[in-house]
Image (spheres, helix red, strand yellow):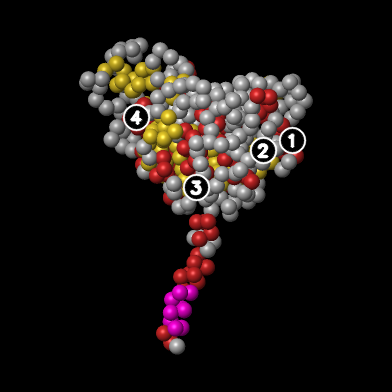
Amino acid sequence: MKKLLCLLLLIALPSTILAFELPFGLSMLKRKNVILIVPDGCSMPIWAAVRAMTVGVDGKLNIDTMLVQGRCRTYSADAMITDSAAAGTAYATGFKTRNGVISMHAMTVRGDSLSGKSLPTILEKAESRGIATGIVSTAMIEHATPAAFYSHRAERDWYNLIAADLPASGIDLIMGGGRQHLLPKGEVGPEMGISKREDSRNIIDEMRAGGYIYLQDKVGFDAYEPEKGDAVLGIFNPGHMQYEFDRKKDTIGEPALWEMTAKAIELLSKNKKGFFLLVEAGRIDHAGNEHDTDRFLWDGIACDKAIGVAQEFAKKHGNTLVIVVPDHGTGGPHLTGVYDADDAEKKVISYNDAGFPSYRLDSDGFPVDDNGRPLAIRWIDWDGHTGEDVGVHAMGPGSEKLDGLVDNTEIHRAMMLHLGFDKKNKDEQSSEIDY
């Protein structure tokens, strides 16, 4: 009898211990979180350059410490070179579509809403199960990549229509730029941002009436303390947010990408069912379009800081899948050495005897002094998107599925499987991807 009692006690003991640890242990393991970070337009050379500027050529960035280091093919349904709409659709829905089309079937004719069929997104499916959702971007929130997760449009440039999809989206947290498409026609908002809408709808007021807390500057952002059940709309610029290089000069102040990421995680992680969060470093792409080396690299540093925020959370909460993957490359940058300090116009590049660059950094880890020998980034004679494979970096449960060479639609599949969507709905379009 005593042996039986001892055996029962041993069986019950672990569950008793777990019961005491439940608020911090088992309950957190039940939550499944996904953080997808998209450095828009980010080619691989950016990380070598950012590494050299900050932690040194032999150091490691946050992105370098992720266990999975694979490659991702980026082509769209109708072109070898994808755009952000088609690439964003692949990540959001698991299907390839035509360039310029947002989360609609590949048979959709760009600009013709009647020709296509909407594709459900991971964000929408997460919401259907009570999972918290968030979007953070340094671009306009109506721009192609974030829009692909909540809107279904045959034309990526229909910003006003895309903005009109936000009030009914149910997204728990939205942060980025794009105020000019949220205010009624003729209204002038902060920073003299004139509305670009053609109707009288005030999307911001509609969302506030629906319970959203509205933030429009750094002061309001810093003052906001997330509470369980909050819905947040943070719009910090009439158009795209400032490049990190220029952020501190903004008229009314903007939060940094890594700060928005941290605040988003703080709020979304209060949901007991877990969360899905998209973080887009959207302006890397724009700097690539302009061949603007400083802004390209500074936004890369900001992105790596945001990656670090996500990693720290994932390390503490083991059921979190973090994926970092660009949608495509832009501009064709190459790290070629350092500029010769003796050349006034910095056109001469030293590479055989370049040595190693030495940068002095500020408290946030951004360069303030290059000792007269700045890194030399050479761009190809093209300012558009490029079609090379992009790096996919990942950590957490399911990240092993992204090792090696994967297709951009497989990013979606890995996220869906981690969140527990392991069976395909009967009403969905058939696909080579079988959940």
The residue under label 1 is 206
Q: CA distance from mark 4 to mark 3?
A: 31 Å
Which residue is drawn at the image coordinates 36% and 37% (left, top)? 404
Residue 182 place in picture, x, y as percent: 69, 28
Q: Residues within 10 Å of mark 3 (few under 14, many from 20)?
A: some
The three-letter code of the residue at mark 2 reads: Ser
- Sequence-first disc among 3 and 2: 2
- Sequence-first disc among 2 and 1: 2
Which residue is drawn at the image coordinates 66% and 21% (left, top)? 112
Foreground pick, 85 / 62: 85
- Sequence-first disc among 1 and 3: 1
- Sequence-first disc among 1 and 4: 4
The magenta region covers 4-12
Residue 344 place in picture, x, y as percent: 33, 11
**Disc 3, disc 2: CB below 8 Å?**
no
**Secondary structure state at the residue bearing disc 4:** helix
Residue 316 place in picture, x, y as percent: 45, 52
